[in-house]
Image (tube, rainbow, N blue to C red):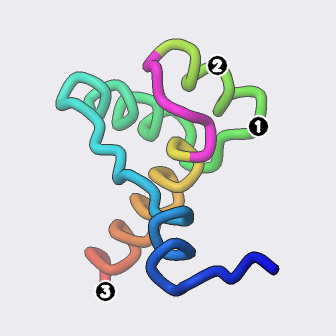
Amino acid sequence: MFERTFSTFYDYNLRMRMKPTSEQVQKLELHMLKCVYPCKKTIFEISEQIGLTAKFIKTWFQNRRAWFKRLIK
């Protein structure tokens, strides 16, 4: 039957890293000042405005909250 090697499995699951532009980061930071924990609806609205995926925005907020937490300590 079909035999999957490590290299084909690895290539199949490889994802490209998304890096937001400086304008997108500025807009995300403005939204962060308004609300640190945005709801799903807000995340989808930001996603449509900025042009990034909702998953990326959710992760960005999560990482930024962790960054602030480390900064305070």
Identify the residue at horizontal 40%, vertical 59% (top origin).
Answer: 64
Which picture quadrant has residue 13?
Answer: bottom right
In the displayed structure, does residue 56 sit left or right of residue 17? right
Q: Which residue does the numbered mark 3 point to in the structure image? A: 73
Mark 1, other Cα within 10 Å: few <14 / some 14–19 / many ≥20: few
The mark lying in front, picked from 2 and 3, is: 2
Q: x, y percentage for residue 2? A: 75, 76
Q: x, y percentage for residue 54? A: 62, 36
In the displayed structure, does residue 26 sit left or right of residue 22? right
Membership of 12 in magenta stretch: no
Q: Which residue does the numbered mark 1 point to in the structure image? A: 40
How far apart are the two marked residues, 2 and 3, measured between alpha carbons?
32 Å
How far apart are the two marked residues, 2 and 1, measured between alpha carbons?
9 Å
Q: Which residue does the numbered mark 2 point to in the structure image? A: 45
Query: Which type of secondary structure does the marked residue at label 2 adopt?
Result: helix
Identify the residue at horizontal 35%, vertical 45% (top origin).
Answer: 18
Q: Nearer the viewer, residue 53 or 36?
A: 53
Q: x, y percentage for residue 4? A: 64, 80
Q: Which residues are magenta?
A: 50-55
Mark 2, other Cα within 10 Å: few <14 / some 14–19 / many ≥20: few
Sequence-earlier tag: 2 or 1 = 1
